[in-house]
Amino acid sequence: MDLPIQNLAVVGAGAMGSGIAALFASRGINVVLIDPVAGALERASAVIERQVGVYAPDAIQETLRRIRMEAGLEAACGSDLVIEAVPEKLELKRDIFARLDTLCPAHTIFATNTSGLSINAIAEAVTRRDRFVGTHFFTPADVIPLVEVVRCDQTTEATVTRVMDFLRLGGKKPVLVRQDIPGFIANRIQHALAREAISLLEKGVASAEDIDEVVKWSLGIRLALTGPLAQRDMNGIDVHYAIASYLYQDLENRTTPSDLLREKAESGQIGAKAGQGFYTWPAEDRDRVLREKSAALAELVAWLGDKKLS
Ligand SMILES: NC(=O)c1ccc[n+]([C@@H]2O[C@H](COP(=O)([O-])OP(=O)(O)OC[C@H]3O[C@@H](n4cnc5c(N)ncnc54)[C@H](O)[C@@H]3O)[C@@H](O)[C@H]2O)c1
């Protein structure tokens, strides 16, 4: 019988990898954080220190001590679980898993944090497809509770159970996605919402600030307590049906990114990390805003933990 997962390797020490490492190390798990790119591990240390300072300020040094930082993939060979969090490129992920497959013992489970690439397509790179799964965390990975667990065609029940148990140990709320569908559940819904929001901005219906204000203080505040389906029950499916019958035909339904989105991406206006996106992000404010947002999210998560509305 497989023992519980005790040693974790995280490959890719960027925004997601450092958050995942921080979370599990702060809960007593030994973590190896692997990244070969110059400067990446130093940046990760700073992010981990900032993040753990938000929810476990007394445990910063202990957490950092539990994280071994390494440049080479060989460091993953003593792990029961490897979570990959490298850039969203299919060939890069497949190449890393193919190498891990030769380095790691047979019992090691492989998980990819892809945002929405096919789990089956990534798993093709390995022979242990029964021990391969998607674990889609949300940013900040150490604060947002949900993780989508996505099986590939060969993932066994035992693998799903072990990974979900491990995620619960880290205080996560894992949900099983039964089909390997692009974008899984959350990114399909997030992109449907963002496509409409960007379209409204492009049409000049309102400013970015006002579109965000509408969502935050109406739908957003409700969604913190009630998912979209339970919310439809509360509003009345008859009302929803009547509105859907005339509104769907007018909603944004383009199948390629809009001109505004493409222009932002191509001109480097890619958001907070570049100082400019839909908003301007002065460098001197950026870290403080991200830190305050993480702290507020951690408080909100703790408060919501006591509510039982959905
Ligand atoms: N940022 C998000 O909101 C978010 C949310 C959920 C899932 N994801 C997914 O998580 C993954 C990582 O995203 P991120 O935002 O952390 O990206 P990131 O760019 O912040 O980090 C990627 C890290 O991978 C490292 N890397 C590059 N090549 C590598 C290699 N060959 N071996 C090991 N490490 C390598 C880079 O140095 C970098 O530190 C992507 O698949 C992304 O789609 C991102």
Image (cartoon, grey):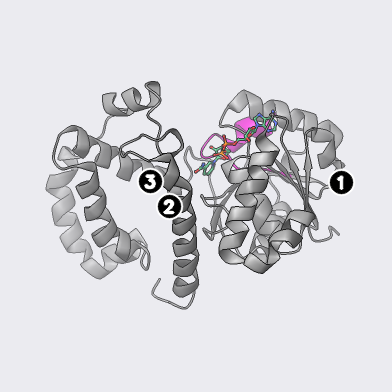
Q: Is residue 8 visible?
A: yes
Whether the residue under disc 3 has CB within 8 Å of ligand 1: no
Is tag 2's residue or tag 1's residue first in the polypeptide sequence? Answer: 1
Tell me where residue 68 appears, x and y as whole percent.
79, 47
Residue type at mark 1 is Gly
Q: Work out how far the residue at label 2 is from the one at label 3, CA to CA, in angstroms.
A: 22 Å
Tell me where residue 2 appears, x and y as whole percent.
84, 57
The residues colored magenta run 110-125
The residue pinned by badge 2 equals 289
In which image quadrant can residue 257 be found? top left
- Residue 207 vertical position relative to residue 58 in the rendered view, above or below: above
Residue type at mark 2 is Val
The residue at 49%/40% (across/down) is: 181
Q: Secondary structure at mark 1?
A: helix
- Residue 147 vertical position relative to residue 188 in the rendered view, above or below: below
- Answer few, some or many: residues within 10 Å of disc 3's Cα (few below 14, many 20 plus, some between 14 and 19): few
From the viewer's perspective, is the residue at label 2 or at label 1 nearer? Answer: 2
- Answer few, some or many: residues within 10 Å of disc 1's Cα (few below 14, many 20 plus, some between 14 and 19): some
Quadrant location, the N terminus: bottom right
Along the horizontal axis of the image, is 213 left or right of 2? left
